[in-house]
Image (cartoon, grey):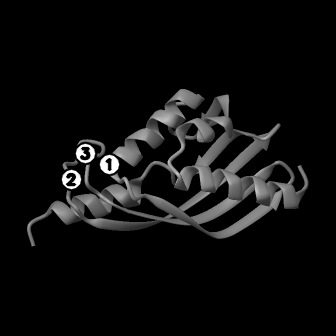
């Protein structure tokens, strides 16, 4: 894909994510996608997104910056939502969280085949843990 097509592709992917459309999201992910430090495969990707959406039904991403180079996208996004369901063992805090995410996607034939970045939710979990501490 040309850089303009990659930018449009990412906008469509982000739109599917913001609609919480798991079927559409699956269409952007290669069945054998590799994710740094996370389980691979489209099923694991979609399961992780479903867990996130259950815990944060208002979760949304906003693109801050996107860099395209050959078959790779480097994305900086802001994500936010309200924690109303259990997430990774943390009971609902009802806290609104806002996190920065950085990722590099490798794309082939219109599907993500590799991901490396901050998708492990370290910053998010820190905010939830901080929110649950007595003040």
Looking at marks 1 and 3 on the same chain, the residue that comes earlier in the sequence is marked by 1
**Which quarter shows the C terminus?**
bottom left
Question: Which numbered tag is attached to residue 86?
Answer: 3
Using the rendered view, name the quadrant where residue 123 is placed: bottom left
Work out how far the residue at label 2 is from the one at label 1, CA to CA, in angstroms: 8 Å
Direction left: furthest residue: 134
Disc 3 on helix, strand or loop?
loop
Residue 120 position within the rendered picture, expressed as x and y whole percent measured from the top left: 46, 48
- Disc 2 to disc 3, how far (Cα)? 5 Å
Residue drawn where x is 31% and y is 67% of the image: 96
Q: Residue at x 60, y 41 (%)?
A: 25
In the rendered structure, which disc, 2 or 3, sits on the residue that comes first in sequence? 3
Label 1 sits on a secondary structure element that is: helix
| Residue at 86%, 61% in the rendered image | 4
Q: Which residue matches tag 2?
A: 92
Is disc 2 in contact with disc 3, using a CB cutoff of under 8 Å?
Answer: yes
Image check: 22 left or right of 6? Answer: left
In the displayed structure, would residue 126 be above or below residue 89?
below
Per the model, the C-alpha gap separating discs 1 and 3 is 6 Å
How far across and down, in percent of the image, does residue 17 sit? 56, 51
| Residue at 8% in and 67% down | 134
Disc sitting over residue 55 in the figure: 1
């Amino acid at each position: 894909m040309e850089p303009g097509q990659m930018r449009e592709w990412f906008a469509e992917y982000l739109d599917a994510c913001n609609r919480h459309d798991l079927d559409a999201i699956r269409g952007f992910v290669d069945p054998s996608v590799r994710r740094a430090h996370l389980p691979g495969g489209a099923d694991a990707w979609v399961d992780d997104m479903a867990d996130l959406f259950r815990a944060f039904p208002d979760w949304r991403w906003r693109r801050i910056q996107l860099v395209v180079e050959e078959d790779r996208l480097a994305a900086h996004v802001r994500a936010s939502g309200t924690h109303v369901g259990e997430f990774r063992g943390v009971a609902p805090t009802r806290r609104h969280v806002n996190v920065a995410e950085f990722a590099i996607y490798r794309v082939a034939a219109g599907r993500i085949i590799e991901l490396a970045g901050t998708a492990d939710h370290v910053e998010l979990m820190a905010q939830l843990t901080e929110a649950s501490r007595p003040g």
